[in-house]
């Protein structure tokens, strides 16, 4: 933790970009509409692209930049499904960018997280979108621990907490499967 604070102090612009991105990543799950969730996610991607660039984490920077572009396309997919080919065309670019910028474990973690996010943003079902975006956060959290990004780690932890809470709130099948959930049944009334 001390090392993370030193990284922030030594890179105030990176810290500022990370903090702005952190807010976006922490609040995206609070929105109900798919388009609002994804617009907020763009803010997260652009902020972290700058943050990781300033920290010299090239794979994470590239993943966030390409994910921002994919998210713009993902927003338009509901209205114009034909644009799906653009989204798919960006997937090999993500893979190539991770290979070109390869830095070992941090690159693997960033690429895995980006893959889960990429698949998630393609979803038109809000619950599946939430599940896949939430599934990417442990990979980002581990990445941020490895590279010393305190804003990234805090954002990931906040996103996991709010994402899980919103997923529970928004998903009836998940709520009903939870231990201790009360199932309401109708009791016939006498006439």
Image: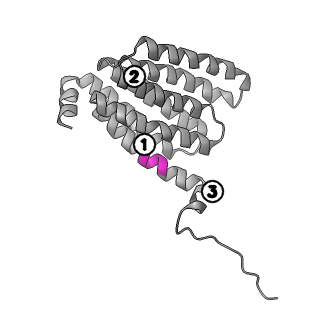
- Label 3 vs label 2: CA separation? 35 Å
**Helix or strand or loop: what does disc 1 sit on?**
helix
- Label 1 vs label 3: CA separation? 21 Å
* Residue at image point 51% right, 18% down: 94
Q: Is the magenta stretch mostly helix, strand or loop?
A: helix
**Helix or strand or loop: what does disc 2 sit on?**
helix
Circle nearer the viewer, 1 or 3:
3
- Crowd rating for badge 3 (residues with CA inside 10 Å; few <14, some 14–19, many 20+): few
Circle nearer the viewer, 3 or 2:
2
- Residue 97 can be seen, yes or no: yes
Camera-nearest residue between 129 and 79: 129
Name the spot of residue 46 as percent of width and height, x first. Answer: 43, 24
Q: Quadrant of residue 85?
A: top right
Residue farthest to the front, as pictured: 104
Chain part drawn in magenta: 160-164
Circle nearer the viewer, 1 or 2:
2
> What is the quadrant of the C terminus in the image?
bottom right
- Crowd rating for badge 1 (residues with CA inside 10 Å; few <14, some 14–19, many 20+): many
- Which of the two discs, 3 and 2, labels the residue nearer the N terminus? 2
Residue farthest to the right, as pictured: 191
Q: Name the residue under label 2.
A: 107
Q: Mark 1 points at which residue?
A: 159
Name the spot of residue 174 as percent of width and height, x first. Answer: 58, 56
**Helix or strand or loop: what does disc 3 sit on?**
helix
- Which of the two discs, 1 and 3, labels the residue nearer the N terminus? 1
Q: Name the residue under label 3.
A: 173
Q: In which quarter of the image is residue 17?
A: top left
């Amino acid at each position: 933790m001390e090392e993370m604070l030193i990284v922030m102090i030594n890179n105030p612009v990176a810290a500022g970009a990370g903090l702005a991105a952190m807010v976006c990543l922490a609040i995206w799950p609070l929105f109900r509409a798919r388009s609002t969730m994804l617009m907020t996610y763009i803010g997260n991607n652009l902020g972290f692209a700058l943050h990781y660039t300033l920290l010299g984490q090239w794979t994470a920077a590239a993943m966030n930049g390409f994910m921002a572009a994919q998210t713009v396309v993902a927003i338009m997919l509901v209205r114009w499904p034909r644009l799906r080919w653009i989204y798919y065309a960006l997937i090999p670019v993500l893979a190539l960018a991770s290979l070109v910028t390869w830095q070992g474990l941090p690159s693997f973690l960033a690429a895995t997280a980006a893959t889960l996010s990429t698949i998630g943003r393609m979803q038109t079902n809000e619950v599946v979108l939430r599940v896949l975006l939430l599934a990417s956060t442990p990979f980002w959290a581990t990445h941020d621990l490895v590279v010393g990004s305190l804003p990234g780690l805090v954002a990931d932890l906040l996103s996991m907490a709010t994402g899980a809470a919103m997923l529970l709130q928004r998903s009836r099948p998940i709520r009903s499967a939870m231990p201790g959930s009360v199932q309401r049944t109708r009791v016939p009334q006498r006439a």
